[in-house]
Image: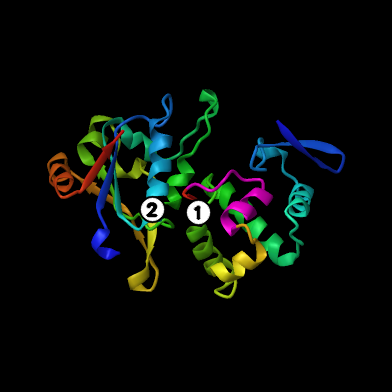
Amino acid sequence: MSENIKKFMFVNTKAPYGTVYALESLEVVLISAAFDQSVSLVFCDDGVFQIANNQNTEASGMKNFSPAYKALGDYDINKIYVETESLEERGLTLDNIMALTYEDEDDDWAEKSSIIPVTRAELADLMDEQDVVISS
Amino acid sequence: MATISVEGKDVEVDEEGYLVTLDDWFPAVASVMAEIDEVEMGDDHWDIINFLREYYEEYQIAPAVRVLTKAVAKKLGKEKGNSKYLYELFPYGPGKQACKFAGLPKPTGCV
């Protein structure tokens, strides 16, 4: 089945609450992980807020689903690209981003960071390498 | 909307038997759902149900069965973290059925 593995990249560009895009995209990502494909995620533009630390949704009345991103490692999704320009433009740094990790099966289950900071230019190259890019 | 009767209380469930309101759960809900599905609940079942509730508390999602199996292996040991063992406990699928008994939504990624 390995010859059928495609590279899927899910690009998240919108703020987490106010629309359903972020949550719906996360659900699609978790479902796609069941099909043994190569899945990576991108957070850019306002999408970087989806994986910001210390989210509090009380005032909005929406469920805070951000803890679910921490489960991505369990789903073998461990390439999470964060665009550095988007962070800077919003006054954020990597310290404001959740520490998403995975356990490396090939390295005695050592816990490693899934967060990969990339520049806009690097991201363009990465997108070029994908079979499928889904943006929301 | 369908309901099941648990200790004199009517608890709302959807057409597949999952709780409509997650906060409605208390242990007897799992027992009544198990009776309906003709599953005899033992300590081993409760271990998985409690594990799922903790997982949901932490991640806000019901894990897919593959993820559940791996996580159970890590927490409760390999002899419990395999699909044969979990399917013996929950014949309709450890993801779907155990999540239902635990009061969680249908697992994300269960297709």
Residue that numbered label 1 is attached to: B64
Q: Secondary structure at mark 1?
A: loop
**Residue at the spot x=72%, y=43% of the render?**
B25
For residue A33, the mark is 2
In which image quadrant can residue B11 be found? top right
User: Of the residues shown, which amino acid type is indicated by label 1?
Assistant: Ala
Q: How is the image coloured?
A: rainbow
Kindly identify the residue that appears in the image at 38 percent across and 45 percent down.
Answer: A29
Q: Is residue A115 above or below residue B12?
A: below
Is B18 inside the magenta-drawn segment?
Answer: no
Estimate the spatial distance between the alpha carbons at disc 1 and disc 2, rounded to whole Å.
10 Å
Tags 1 and 2 in contact by the CB under 8 Å rule?
yes
On the image, the x and y values in percent for residue B43 come to: 74, 65
Can residue B81 be seen here? The reply is no
Magenta segment, which residues?
B93-108
Residue B104 in the magenta stretch? The answer is yes
Q: Which mark is residue A107?
A: none
Q: Name above or below for residue A36 compared with residue B44.
A: above
Which part of the image, by quadrant, shows the N terminus of chain B? top right
- Residue A126 image point, x, y percent: 17, 48
Circle 2 chain: A
Q: Nearer the viewer, residue A119 or B3?
A: B3
**Total numbered labels placed on residues in the image:** 2
Q: Nearer the viewer, residue A34 or A72?
A: A34
Q: Relative to A40, is B82 on the left or the right?
A: right
The location of residue A11, given as percent across then percent down, is 28, 39
Q: Residues within 10 Å of mark 2 (few under 14, many from 20)?
A: many
Residue B108 placement, left or right of B97: left
Question: Of the residues shown, which amino acid type is indicated by label 2?
Answer: Ala
Q: Nearer the viewer, residue A70 or B98?
A: B98
